[in-house]
Image (cartoon, rainbow, N blue to C red):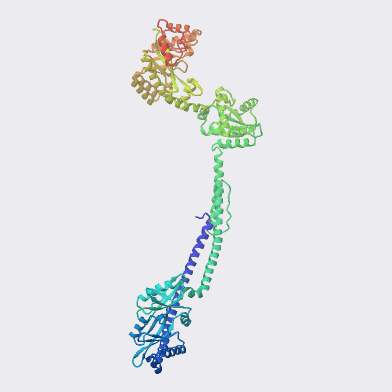
Amino acid sequence: MFKRLQTKLTVLYAGLFALALSLVAVSVYLTIANNAQQQVRGELAATGTVFDSVWALRTQRLRDGADLLSRDFGFRAAVATRDAPTVDSAVTNLRQRMGLELAFMVGIDGDVVGVDPAKIDIGKLWSALDHEDGAQGVFVVDGAPYQLISAPVMSPNLTGWIVFGARLDDREMTALEQLAAIRLDAQVFDRRGETWVTTDKTADAKALGALVATATAAGKAVSAPTRLRTAAGDNLVLVKRLKTLDGQTPAALVLRYPMALAMAPYQPLMAAVFIAVLAGAALVVAASWALSRDIARPIAALEDAARRLRRGEAVHVDVRSSDEIGHLSDSFNLMAAEIREREVRITELALRDAETGLPNHLAMEREIEARMARLAPGEQVVVGALGLDRFTVLRSAIGYALFTQLVAEIGARIQVIDPEAVVGRLTTSTLCVISRLTALTDEVVPLIEKALVDLAAPVRLGGELVDVHMTNGLAAAEAGTIDAPRLIEQAMIALDQARACGRKVSIFDAAAYGDPAGNLSLMSEMLQGVATGALFLHHQPKLDLRSGAITGLEALVRWAHPTRGLLRPDLFVGMAEETGHIRALTDCVIDRAILDQRALREVGHDLTISINISGRLIDDAEFADRAIEKIAAAGARFCFEITETAVIGNPDVALGVLAKLNAAGIPVSIDDYGSGLSSLAYLKQINAEELKIDKAFVLSLENDAKDALLVKSTIDLAHSLGLKVTAEGVESRQALAMLQMMGCDLAQGYHIARPMALDKLVVFLGDWQISNPLPVGEG
C-alpha cells in the first residue's frame, strides 16, 4: 500500500497509538455512561417513591374534604330534599376553598350536580362508586385523567356520593418534576380502548405508550427503569402503575429522563479526553515521522548508493550513528570499497592478456572506438594484424612458455619502433597494432615492410636465437563507417589475404573477400530450393569409344535462383561442403537422378548415371546406408564419382564405405585423376571400376606431347589394374581420335555434347546414330 518506509512506520505507530487511546476513550465513556445510568436509575426510583408519598398525601386531603362535606347536616339535608342549588353551592364552595379542579355530587339515581354530565361516563362512574365505599383512583373526565376521591352521603340512608378530583395535567406533572433531584419528565398515560394516551402530544408519546403497554402487561405496580431510544434520543423510563377508579381501565405514571442530560456534566471531560487523543495522536504522528525519517533516510541513502554501485559508480554512505543502521552503513561502505577494488582488478584482467600482459582483444576494440570518437573529418583509424608465421612449427620447437615470451618481445619491439602505437594480442599468434597514422595509402606499405625487417630480427629466448617471420594485414576506417570489431576483422582478413598471395604486407581487399554473409544466406536459400524443386539436373552424355554408343551420363546439378538466375555449381557446391549442407544437396541430386533415370527408361534409354560424391561424405557411413537404400528401392543404375584424395582424411572408414558401395552393386569412379597429389598406394587400395583422366591433360592432348604421354601411360596403368578409363574435356575431333588410338574406353566433353536438360537429352539420344559416332553435340 505504502511505497515509503517512513510513511509505513508513521502510519503504524500513529495507528497503534490512536487505537490504544481510542480504547481508553471508549472505556472512559462506557464507565461514565454506566455510572450516569446508575445514578439516573436511582433518581427515578427515588422520584417514584416521592410520587407515592405525594399521591398518598393528596389522596388523604381529598378524602378528608369529601368526608367533611358528606357529614355536614345541611348538605345531607339538601341532598335528601334534592335541593340542587344548595348542593351545588356547597360543592362549589368547598372546591374553591380546597383549590380543587373538580367537585361534584352523584345521586344514587345517577343525577350529577356540579359538573356537566356529558363530560362523564356516568354509567362507569356510578358502577365504580357503588362497588366500593370511598372509591378512589384515576378516572377520565372530559378527556383528561383525574385523581378522584369519593365519599358516600348518608341521609340516613345512602343518597349519593360526593366526588372530589385533582387533574393530572401538565401543571401537576411539573410540580412532581420539581420535587425530583434531576430534571425528569413526568406523564400520566391511560388506556382508552386499545391505545395508551397522554395529554402530552410529543413525538415520543407513541413510543412511550408502547413501553407502558409492555410494562403494565407484566402486572407489576412498578417496573424497573428501562432504556428507551426515541426520536428525541436515548432515555431511561420508569413506569408506575396507577390505581383507577373502576379498576378495569389501567393508568400509569411515566417518569422519563434523557441520557443526554445525564451525560451533559461529563461532556467537558469527554471533550478533554477527545482533545487529548487528538493531541496525543498528532504528537505521535510527529514523533513517528521524525523517528521514521531518521530510520528511512539512511536506508534511502543506502538504496541510492546500491543503485549507483550497480551502475559501477564509486559510492560512500555517510551515516554518523552508532546503532545497527550505522553498522550497516559501515559494512556497506566496506563492501563497496572491496567491490570497487575487485572491479578494478576484473577490468584489468578483462582488458589484459594474462600471459603477455599486453592489452587483449576487448581492450583494442575500446581503444579503436575511443580513437574513432576523436577523429577529424577525413581521418581514419589504421589497424594492423601482425601474425607470426609458422606458428605451429615454432611453438612445437620452443615450447608454449617461450612462445609466449616471443609474442611479448615482439610487442615490446613494436613499442620501441613506434612509441605512439598501441599494441595488443588478438590471438595466440597474432598481435593488433593501432597505428598513429590517420590514413592508409599505398605509400604506407613500403614503410611497414621496412619496419617488419627490424621486427623480424632473431630473438634470444632461453639462451638460443629464434628466427622470426611475420606477415601484416592492414585495414582502416573513418568514424561511423564500421565498428571496432569489424575493423579488426578486416585486418585479420587482410592478414590471410597477404599470406595467400605470398606477400608480407597487404591492405584489406573487399572485392577479393566477397560477401560471406550473402554466401551464408545463399545456403539457407539453397535448402529452400531443395524443398521447392528449384534445384534440378543437367546430364552430359558419355560416349563408348569402341561401340560409338552413348552408354552413360554424368548428372550435374543446376540451380535456378529466383533473383540471381541460373547459378554455376562451383558457386554453391563448394560452399555447401564448407557449411555442412553438402549431404542435403547430394540427397537431392540422388532423388532427382532416380526420377530422371526412370523417365529415360520409359522412352527406351537405360543408361548408367554417374553422380559426383563429395569427399566430406565418403567417410559418412550413415549417408552411404541411406543412398544404398534409396538406389536399391528404385532399382537405379548409378556410379559414384569420387576424388582420389577423398580417402586421405579418414582412410579406414572411407575404404570401408567404398567396399560397402561396391557390395551393393554401386560402382565407383575415381574422378579428376592427375589433378591433385595422385598416390599409387591409394589407387591400389580403392575398389573402383573406372578412372577419369582430368580434363587439364585432355584439353592440350593434340598440342603437347608430354600430356599425350601422360594420358597414354595412365590409360595403360588403369587397364593393367582392371579399370575402365574415361577422358573428360574432349572438345575436338583430333583429341577424340587420339583417345581412340590410345585405347581409351569412354569420353565426354563439349565435342560430344554439352550438359543438357532432360527433355533435350531425350531428343539428343533419339537422334544419335552409331554410324556417325563423332558428331558435334549441341549445348
Residue at 48%, 67% (x, y): give it.
Answer: 22
Q: Work out which residue is located at the far bottom of the displayed protein and give it.
A: 73
- Residue 465 in view (yes/no): no
Query: Which of the two residues, 178 or 244, is positioned nearer the viewer here?
Result: 244
Q: Quadrant of residue 477?
A: top right
On screen, residue 483 versus residue 92, left or right, reads: right
The image quadrant of residue 39 is: bottom left
Seen from the viewer's position, the closer of residues 665 and 62 is 62
Q: From what the image shows, is residue 79 above or below residue 331?
A: below
Compared to residue 151, the image places residue 638 above or below, namely above
Image quadrant where residue 290 sits? bottom right
Q: Position of residue 637 (x, y in %)?
A: 36, 17
Residue 729 vertical placement versus 280 (above, below)? above
Would residue 323 be found to the left or right of residue 615 on screen? right
Q: Position of residue 720 (x, y in %)?
A: 39, 11
How far across and down, in percent of the image, does residue 109 sit?
A: 35, 86
Q: Nearer the viewer, residue 142 or 360?
A: 142
Q: Nearer the viewer, residue 274 or 572?
A: 274
